[in-house]
């Protein structure tokens, strides 16, 4: 929809104009009476929120779109980009917060302040190596053969694949131990409900593994007792007990989310950051 | 990009109209009732216990970015912070999203100010940890252990890290309350937390806490919508069953009417 602007000067001028307009708008907003400010925010929220429903609901080939041209659809990506740009401004704030918290840990020698030192070293190192890998991969020397990495590329690979990805996988793998301890607590049979839960879980688990299928394989396929084969019973439990329950909960969740969205869109939401206390 | 069919417009239109009707009737003074929610009742107990122990509270909004579920979680966080501020206790809010970081900081600051203790607010208690799921999870469990938190609140969208957080909280003996619309994480929270708020209860929490007529009306409007949707589903089931069994039903009808 919008073609990229190639001129650097024009780009900088446009960015400066955007910042200037935003600063003026925020300045005016801060200096008007609270009631008027509230009304402006309400109107802006309503108009901004109106775009997506209109884009989704306006039908083709009616008086609203006589040429079968969805005139709102081409704006989807530019609006998404604008939202992403606005969100990007907050990344700096997040990183500043991170640095302040860790700098304070170090300056006050709080418990675990060594971790904060490691944080600063890792952050700076990753920042430098990532930039170097992107803009100057041949900084110290060029790759001598096909498939060989330069020192900068090797450093990036070690830090990203060797450290970051491995650490992510390590934390994820903790889940296996936590599932075991949580399952032990959940399946302790203390009440009738816990016993039912345990029985259901056992059937579903046995229905998923070969040994479970083997245990009931002697029940003939044509028999009326076929239902009691673990794999069939497990499938039945998942499709007829588990799934309807999940869908029932999801119904409530979706209706609740729609109600919350309506309250925000129409500026009816109250509490916390919405302007009035609980 | 997908666009709406008539049925979408019809369903969303009817549900929205019923919710707005609930809100309007509540604003006109109609008495509305919400059943007790044990998990929400326990919030005050958890905050009180943390204060008695002289330890902070941790409130995680999970992997929430700018979405409805996170806004709901922040509304609850705001209430928890106001309670904690009354006792001059600390609430630590670790976040994964920088936009939510700015909103959470403002909500916490306002909560302490409204409780009459703006000096008790510590900006570093709202922490942006990382944009990565498991880095965030390890950051949160680090905070739990270092700060020795006495109460954990997990409200918002969660994924695989839910059990890592809840089991760590369980191991340090913290009282834990969770609420999420992420249906796959609910069993993990039930197994590891003291109280869990499921599904629509998560969205009813702010009405239960605030007793605000708009919130109460909205929850009652949701109930009207669910009744309408259930009736619609039932009608669909009957029509679908009749359609597949039409030949038999026709035969039965003929038999009953003497073969006419």
Image (tube, rainbow, N blue to C red):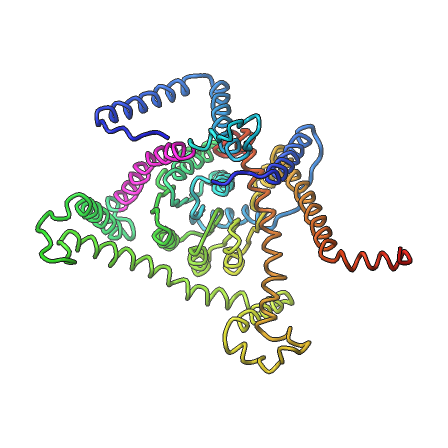
Indicate whether residue A154 is drawn in magenta: no
* Frontmost residue, B236 versus B94: B236
* Frontmost residue, A141 versus B4: B4
* Vertical comparison of A73 with A184: above or below: above
* Vertical comparison of A133 with A62: above or below: below
The number of callouts visible is 0
Looking at the rendered image, the quarter that the C terminus of chain B falls into is bottom right
Instruction: From the top left corner, tell me how far across and down residue B28 is, in percent.
Output: 69, 28
Place residue A243 in its image quadrant: bottom right
Q: Could you tell me if residue A55 is visible in this image?
A: yes
Q: Main secondary structure of the magenta part?
A: helix
Instruction: From the top left corner, tell me how far across and down residue A14 is, in percent.
Output: 28, 24
* Vertical comparison of B53 with A14: above or below: below
Q: Could you tell me if residue B204 is visible in this image?
A: no
Q: Is residue B246 left or right of residue A225?
A: right
Q: Is residue B20 left or right of residue B259?
A: left
Place residue A195 in its image quadrant: bottom right
Instruction: From the top left corner, tell me how far across and down residue B75 is, in percent.
Output: 51, 39
Q: Residue furthest bottom?
A: A218
Q: Residue at x 11, y 58 (%)?
A: A145
- Please provide the residue range marked out in magenta: A76-105
* Frontmost residue, B85 versus B128: B128
Q: Residue at x 42, y 32 (%)?
A: A74
Indicate whether residue A78 is drawn in magenta: yes
Instruction: From the top left corner, tell me how far across and down residue B40 is, in percent.
Output: 57, 47
């Amino acid at each position: 929809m919008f073609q990229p602007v190639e001129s650097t000067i024009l780009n900088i001028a446009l960015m400066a104009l955007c910042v200037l307009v935003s600063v003026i708008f925020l300045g005016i907003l801060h200096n008007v009476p609270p009631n008027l400010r509230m009304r402006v925010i309400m109107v802006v929220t309503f108009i901004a929120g109106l775009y997506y429903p209109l884009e989704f609901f306006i039908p083709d080939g009616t008086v609203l779109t006589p040429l079968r041209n969805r005139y709102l659809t081409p704006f989807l990506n530019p609006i998404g980009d604008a939202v992403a740009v606005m969100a990007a401004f907050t990344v700096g704030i997040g990183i500043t917060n991170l640095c302040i918290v860790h700098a304070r840990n170090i300056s006050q020698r709080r418990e675990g302040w060594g971790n904060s030192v490691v944080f600063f070293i890792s952050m700076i190192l990753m920042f430098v190596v990532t930039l170097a890998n992107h803009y100057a991969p041949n900084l110290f020397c060029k790759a001598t053969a096909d498939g060989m990495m330069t020192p900068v590329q090797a450093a990036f690979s070690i830090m990203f694949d060797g450290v970051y990805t491995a650490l992510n996988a390590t934390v994820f793998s903790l889940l296996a131990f936590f599932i075991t301890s949580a399952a032990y607590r959940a399946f302790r049979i203390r009440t009738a409900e816990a016993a039912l839960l345990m029985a259901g879980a056992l059937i579903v688990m046995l229905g998923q593994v070969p040994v479970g299928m083997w245990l009931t394989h002697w029940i003939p396929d044509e028999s009326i007792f076929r239902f009691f084969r673990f794999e069939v019973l497990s499938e039945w439990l998942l499709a007829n007990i588990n799934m309807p329950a999940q869908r029932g909960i999801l119904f409530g969740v979706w209706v609740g989310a729609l109600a919350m969205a309506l309250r925000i869109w129409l500026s009816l939401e109250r509490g916390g950051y919405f302007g009035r206390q609980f | 990009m997908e666009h709406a069919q008539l049925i979408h417009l019809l369903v969303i239109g009817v549900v929205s109209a019923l919710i707005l009707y609930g809100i309007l009737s509540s604003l006109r003074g109609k008495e509305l009732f919400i059943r007790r929610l044990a998990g929400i009742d326990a919030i005050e107990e958890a905050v009180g216990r943390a204060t008695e122990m002289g330890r902070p509270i941790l409130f995680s909004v999970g992997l929430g970015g700018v979405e409805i579920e996170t806004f709901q979680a922040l509304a609850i966080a705001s209430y928890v912070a106001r309670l904690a501020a009354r006792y001059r206790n600390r609430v630590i809010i670790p976040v994964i999203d920088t936009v939510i970081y700015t909103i959470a900081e403002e909500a916490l600051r306002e909560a302490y100010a409204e409780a009459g203790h703006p000096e008790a607010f510590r900006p570093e208690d709202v922490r942006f940890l990382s944009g990565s799921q498991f880095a965030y999870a390890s950051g949160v469990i680090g905070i739990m252990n270092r700060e020795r938190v006495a109460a954990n609140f997990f409200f918002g969208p969660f994924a695989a890290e839910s059990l890592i957080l809840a089991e760590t909280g369980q191991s340090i003996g913290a009282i834990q309350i969770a609420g999420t619309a992420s249906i796959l994480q609910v069993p993990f929270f039930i197994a590891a937390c003291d109280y869990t708020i499921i599904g629509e209860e998560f969205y009813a929490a702010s009405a239960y806490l605030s007793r605000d007529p708009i919130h109460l009306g909205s929850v009652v409007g949701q109930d009207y919508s669910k009744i309408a949707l259930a009736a619609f589903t039932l009608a669909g089931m009957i029509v679908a069953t009749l359609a597949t069994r039409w030949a038999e039903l026709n035969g039965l009808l003929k038999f009953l009417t003497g073969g006419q």
